[in-house]
Amino acid sequence: MDGRKVWSVGFLVGLILPLALLGCSLQSPQALHPPTWIWGDWALDAATDTLVFPFSATTVVQRSGISSIDLGELYRVAKLPVTETITDSLYLFGVQDQAGYSTYRFAKVDENTVNLTIGSSVSTVGPVPMHRL
């Protein structure tokens, strides 16, 4: 994988977490609801596990190196309202608060590949291919 893409994704991930933690909405918390076609673990590079997204029925976890964050739990604790778009080939979720917005877009290419695009009020990175582990 191109080192600039890995760096860009890592940089953007570093921006999204603070955005999600800064402003807390007073609306009730919501959980994530990933579609069944994406359940399991997806990685940018299966050989190095640079960035991995494990999906389950109720949440999405983002792992990078030794750090890990349960995005569904983060959004629930911060009481951030989540918007989701779910189709047979797209899973898109995002949050908006006083600091801006962040989105994760997973577009299905085939059974073993999705294209990830991460967006925020500041910038967008992707799409980058992720592979099923």
Image (tube, rainbow, N blue to C red):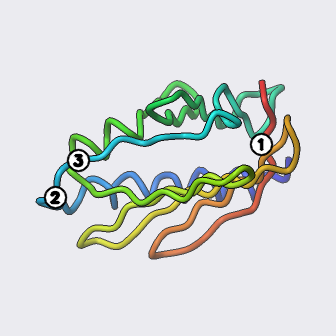
Disc 1 is placed on an element classified as strand
Q: How crowded is mark 1: few (under 14 residues within 10 Å), some or many (20 or more)?
A: many
Q: Mark 2 points at which residue?
A: 27
x, y (%) of residue 61?
50, 33
Q: Nearer the viewer, residue 33 or 45?
A: 33
Q: Mark 1 points at which residue?
A: 130
Q: Quadrant of the C terminus?
A: top right
Disc number for residue 35: none
Q: Which amino acid does label 3 sit on?
A: Pro
**Residue at 51% over, 52% down:** 13
Disc 2 is placed on an element classified as loop
Disc number for residue 29: 3
Q: Nearer the viewer, residue 44 or 28?
A: 28
x, y (%) of residue 41?
67, 27
Q: Is 43 on the left-hand or right-hand side of 39?
A: right
| In contact (CB < 8 Å): disc 3 and disc 2 | yes
**Residue at 66% over, 54% down:** 87
